[in-house]
Amino acid sequence: MFFSIIIPLYNRPQEIDELLDTLTRQTYSQFEVLVIEDGSVNDAKAIVETYADRLDIKYYFKENAGQGFARNYAFERALGDYFIIFDSDILVPADYLETVRNYLHEHQLDAYGGPDAAHESFTPVQKAISYAMTSPFTTGGIRGNKKHVGQFHPRSFNMGVSRKAWEKVGGFILTRLGEDIEYSIRIHENGFKIGLIPEAKVYHKRRTSFSQFYKQLHFFGRARINIYKHFPKELKLVHFFPAIATVGMIGTILMNFIYPPLAYILDFMVLLYFMLIFFHSWSVNKFLKVAFLSIISSFIQLTAYGLGFIQDLFKRVVFGGNRK
């Protein structure tokens, strides 16, 4: 099996350097790498060229059109039997491709997704952000978990698509705002089999600051409404939970001024919730600082997603907007 690894890139030369370095260590060598520079001002051509003697690598520069269409550009030029899509802000374990190849030989999958985790080299903030995105107390622990609600939808930071599926379904029709979920829904609707490969994990750096993390999660909340506009049946009750939690926390703050006796009960419930996060993160990460930071990252994860979800719910659904 020959893999085509596809990496869209926009103004992140340092990230691609770290990612490509991990690809030179793969125990399975039958792969090519396609880096698609999506109209970057700070391009990575010089960095990519330094790997020419260590990787079967191709570099393309195109006008900016967004990550979804950058991937389409690579699909049309890829030679592989299977396309693997990575975000530029990941590190790939040395046995990743071997793990995927072995799994696909035993289990027929036309598309797959894999989980993410925090690398030991990550900063405490990055580890706290990783915790917030994988914790049972925030996302329900369903990202990269076999126990998920409804059909599994691979996420584009770690996603594979067979050439056969691409030839029938085509590429991305959205370039942002939930484009990976929309794409996996179409793959599934065309009769192809999609699944999770639990052992095919990557180390996802995500964002390096809480302000960047807030912007990203606010975007994710809006993206869920964008998916709803295309596939109404894909909006589940679980997707409302961050919005409900956000409204609940705002209501708790207001209740301290309106009716303190009730506020004491609500304050205790919120305190208990964040104490659970603290001790669970401490047990997982074995680091007191990360446990404290996990309270902040979990609060951001819920409220940023919730506010983005509420914003576009009213803007695009309640008030009938139709922007895509």
Image (spheres, grey):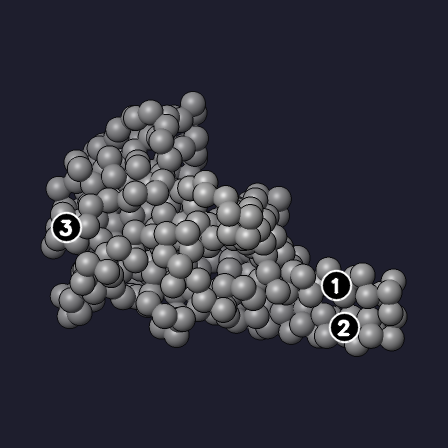
Residue of label 1: 251
Q: Please determine whether, in this image, residue 5 is positioned above or below residue 131.
A: above
Q: Which amino acid does label 1 sit on?
A: Gly
Residue 290 visible somewhere in the drawing: no
Q: Nearer the viewer, mark 2 or mark 1?
A: 1
Q: Please determine whether, in this image, residue 282 is positioned above or below residue 216.
A: below
Q: In which quarter of the image is residue 208?
A: top right
Residue of label 2: 266
Question: Mark 1 or mark 2, which is nearer the start of the sequence?
Answer: 1
Q: Which amino acid does label 2 sit on?
A: Leu
Disc 3 packing (10 Å; few <14; some 14–19; many ≥20)? few
Dots 2 and 1: beta carbons under 8 Å? yes
Residue 238 on image: x %, y %: 50, 68
Looking at the picture, tell me which residue is in the foreground, 281 or 166: 166
Under circle 2, the secondary element is helix
Residue of label 3: 168
Question: Mark 3 or mark 2, which is nearer the start of the sequence?
Answer: 3
**Residue at point 23%, 56% (across, down):** 187
**Marker count (numbered):** 3
Disc 1 packing (10 Å; few <14; some 14–19; many ≥20)? some
Q: Quadrant of the C terminus?
A: top left
Under circle 1, the secondary element is helix
Under circle 3, the secondary element is helix
Residue 306 visible somewhere in the drawing: yes
